[in-house]
Image (tube, rainbow, N blue to C red):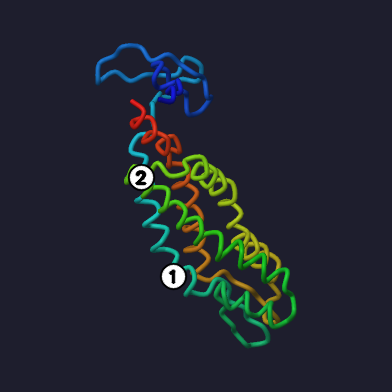
Amino acid sequence: MAQREVTAKHLGMISCQNCHLLCRQPQRNKHQQLLCPRCGSALHSRKPNSLSRCWALVIAASILLIPANLMPITITSALGHTQADTILSGVFYFIQTGIWPIALVIFVASVFVPLTKLLILILLMLSVQLRWRWRPRDRTRLYRLTELVGRWSMVDVYVVTILVALVKLGAVATIDAGPGAAYFAGVVIMTMFAARNFDPRLIWDALEETND
């Protein structure tokens, strides 16, 4: 039989979520809250209500993703002509004009990354709830990758913000942010918070229970 790996949890120790100080867990009653001696943050063996919070944020982001892609993200007025563009219509516009690099960046950052991030988070949460023991190291890497690249989805919001600030030429040409921009920003923020609330240590708990 393989020897069980010794973890901080088995040794009665807790890692602070903020300053990462490894603290010994004293005997306490259920109403007593443990505090980190270095930064004063509350100590928890696992993030409280991690899956519940993550599911709520993922569901909210999935709902916001629909209007974010269907509603215009920019409204351009030039010489009396008004045009509203969604994220995908902007991608098609850059493809038709031959500017493939910008089209690729917008598609990856604003379509592929948010959708993939939501799917990965759903997969990770299901794997924890169903007590999967399948490839925990790869699932942990997936979580780290999701946490790392999620913020780059804000590229489209930054582009819209810059265009709205710069293109203000009165009757000649103006660019305003459409309602889709607010929904898309909500999707990015929700997925970032969802990734932050997910506790990757839950992935390994099923293996530890098997070895107990």
Vertical comparison of 110 with 126: above or below: below
Residue at horizontal 46%, vertical 56%? 118
Q: From mark 1 to mark 2, how far is it between C-alphas?
A: 22 Å
What's the residue type where badge 2 is placed?
Arg
Look at the numbered disc 2 and give the secondary structure of its residue.
Answer: helix
Residue at horizontal 45%, vertical 18%? 36
* Quarter that holds the C terminus: top left
Rendered image: mark on residue 160? none
Vertical comparison of 146 with 116: above or below: above
Q: Give whichever of 161, 186 is nearer the camera.
A: 186
Residue at horizontal 59%, vertical 51%? 149
Q: Give whichever of 77, 105 is nearer the camera.
A: 105
- Choose the circle earlier in sequence order: 1 or 2: 2
Which residue extends farthest front?
1
Q: Splitting the image into 4 quarters, where does residue 93 fall?
A: bottom right
Q: Give whichever of 58, 129 is nearer the camera.
A: 129
Residue at horizontal 40%, vertical 37%? 202
**Other residues around mark 1 within 10 Å, as few (<14) / some (14–19) / many (≥20):** some
Question: Can you give x and y, in whole percent of width and height, for residue 196 in the image?
Answer: 47, 42
Vertical comparison of 107 with 82: above or below: above
Which residue extends farthest left?
30
**Other residues around mark 2 within 10 Å, as few (<14) / some (14–19) / many (≥20):** some
Pointer 2 residue: 53
Q: Splitting the image into 4 quarters, where does residue 47 fall?
A: top left
Question: Can you give x and y, in whole percent of width and height, for residue 85 in the image?
Answer: 57, 77
Q: In this view, does 11 lie to the left or right of 81?
A: left
What's the residue type where badge 1 is placed?
Pro
* Quarter that holds the N terminus: top left
Pointer 1 residue: 67
Question: Can you give x and y, in whole percent of width and height, for residue 16 in the image?
Answer: 47, 24
Look at the numbered disc 1 and give the secondary structure of its residue.
Answer: helix
The reply to whether discs 1 and 2 touch (Cβ–Cβ < 8 Å) is no
